[in-house]
Image (cartoon, coloured by chain):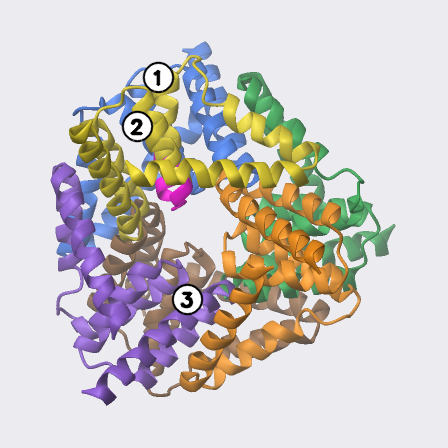
Chain colours: A brown, B purple, C yellow, D orange, E blue, F green
Amino acid sequence: MERAEEFKERRERGNEALLRHADLPLKRFLALDRDVYADGNLSGRTKELLGLVASLVLRCDDCITYHLLQARRHGVRTEELAEAMSVALVVGGSIVIPHVRRAAELLEEEHHGNDTT
Amino acid sequence: MERAEEFKERRERGNEALLRHADLPLKRFLALDRDVYADGNLSGRTKELLGLVASLVLRCDDCITYHLLQARRHGVRTEELAEAMSVALVVGGSIVIPHVRRAAELLEEEHHGNDTT
Amino acid sequence: MERAEEFKERRERGNEALLRHADLPLKRFLALDRDVYADGNLSGRTKELLGLVASLVLRCDDCITYHLLQARRHGVRTEELAEAMSVALVVGGSIVIPHVRRAAELLEEEHHGNDTT
Amino acid sequence: MERAEEFKERRERGNEALLRHADLPLKRFLALDRDVYADGNLSGRTKELLGLVASLVLRCDDCITYHLLQARRHGVRTEELAEAMSVALVVGGSIVIPHVRRAAELLEEEHHGNDTT
Amino acid sequence: MERAEEFKERRERGNEALLRHADLPLKRFLALDRDVYADGNLSGRTKELLGLVASLVLRCDDCITYHLLQARRHGVRTEELAEAMSVALVVGGSIVIPHVRRAAELLEEEHHGNDTT
Amino acid sequence: MERAEEFKERRERGNEALLRHADLPLKRFLALDRDVYADGNLSGRTKELLGLVASLVLRCDDCITYHLLQARRHGVRTEELAEAMSVALVVGGSIVIPHVRRAAELLEEEHHGNDTT
């Protein structure tokens, strides 16, 4: 899962640059962006699916990659991700297609990664 | 739940007008928009939450009302809806606030409706 | 076509308020927004359809109403409008549905208006 | 400034409904949404203009009304608001026009309100 | 037209990955996304222009490239594409500029491609 | 500030391609896009901040880079840019994060550039 590793490093580097310049509200926003996906009345697993679909319809590739990887960490299966993508596609329209294509390719890399392990 | 009833009637009337003019692709889209929320690897219940959050971040009030009512039909609790709204708010930003306000008011009407029954 | 008349009056009143406060760039933008739909290599008729679909996918009701009325002035038929709406729906997704519903209702009012004349 | 009063009441009522159901992240978001406009390296006055233009290009009417009223409280002049609207119009395109129309009408009501005082 | 070829290959590869994971609604959506551009009351040629402008205002580069190439296949001339871009720019604002820049560069590559053939 | 130089060249090249195909409305739009940021009742400096925040919430990377560089030319300090980013983040939500990350990295490159001079 090469693209996933590359993404994580790029994200980490970007976050560090951001935090060197961030004011207090920005730091509070980043903390909130982490805490809102914690287990509660809805499970963290379901919340990651919510974050994924929100990211798909808003067409934010980095956000999609992030929530896809998080969903995997929560054990979300490929068949479940495929259905979440369908909902996003119907709500958000054909402009979401390039993003579900890239999401599908990320899932493929992961499979290949698993094969070689 | 006055606003809910009003919404349903308005939606019904609009759909009838739309279907009188719709070509085949439009009808196929409407069918797809119904079928994508069916039980599958993800439950219809979870899919309605996905549809709700997608509608919130895209700020489509009629879509929000529709998925809120559908979520209720699936037995989603207020505490769960509140957390879905929080995810939508963090992903979509303060421009989502007017929509979660209206969603909260819809939930209130529902409670009052239940009280008087 | 009551809603059409109401729209035209409201739009006129809003434009007057806007022009009382507008600076030069805003006035230039408004002129440009009129001139870009003139006949050229593409006909004004086709450009109004482009404006309509752009307004539908961006979900701007006032813009949709405006371009729908303009398309009618250019003689665009209901069957053509229906197909333009289908394209907008597929590109923009189910969040466009409330807007095509309202557009269809506007077309209905127009028919009733014609019947009674 | 009738519309302004109506807006404030509606907003207040909606916020109360929202807070009755809000979870902690939602409450933290609302606090952040207030604090981010405080005086800092940029003045609160400038930040309200930033919030106004962001709301205009994202086409959130309640947000526009809110930041317009806040900008007034900071003493922003009509000529300055007109130029901020022009920037928003050029960045966001003609779909922003209905919103600057409504903003201009709000400014007019205010003037009439001042006249009668 | 190097970028066009690269795009087609990337798109094909992505579609294959997507179809390996797609559920039925996703497949139906993809079929609909093809069929909606067929000749009807509006020509396929006009529908591709509608798809292009919708893609421009929604700022989806892959969608823009796709519809630009499709429009060419239907014989749409550069002068017509330029006017469609102008409509998109006025409706969608200056944030569309980076996309019309890239579209213009794609047209240039095409010309160079033709020269060397 | 390597990325800044690369951006300027790419932007210049794209603009040249665009102007070779542009019709009159497109040229007028580009002129307007330049003139709207001139000093007026609001300073050009403040207008660039408005353009930056509008670009951030609309998530247009090229626009963000452009207005960031323009803001610097007007002497806007890093602390001020950080606060403008916070406003954009709260208004536009977590989908803006990848863009403020890239903006922060651009500011870092600039510092390094200054160090070596």
Residue B15 part of the magenta segment: no
**Residue bearing the label numbered 2:** E48
Picture layout, residue B95 above or below residue C48: below
Spatial CA distance of label 1 from label 3 is 42 Å
Residue named by callout 3: B99
Percent position (x, y) of residue D39? 77, 70
Same chain under badges 2 and 1? The reply is yes
**Label 1 packing within 10 angstroms: few (<14), some (14-19), many (20+):** some
Tally the numbered discs: 3
At x 42% / y 43%, what residue is drawn?
E58
Q: Residue furthest front?
A: D116
Residue range in magenta is C53-62
Marks 3/2: CA–CA distance: 34 Å
Whether the magenta-drawn stretch holds residue C60 is answered as yes
Label 1 sits on residue: E76
Which of the chains bears the disc numbered 1?
E
Classify mark 1: helix, strand or loop.
Answer: loop
Within-10-Å neighbours for mark 3: few <14, some 14–19, many 20+: many
Q: Which callout, 3 or 2, points to the residue nearer the camera?
A: 3
Q: Is residue D69 left or right of residue B89?
A: right
Regarding mark 3 in the picture, which secondary structure is present there? helix
Q: Position of residue F79 (x, y in %)?
A: 78, 64
Mark 2 and mark 1 in contact? Answer it, CB < 8 Å. Answer: yes
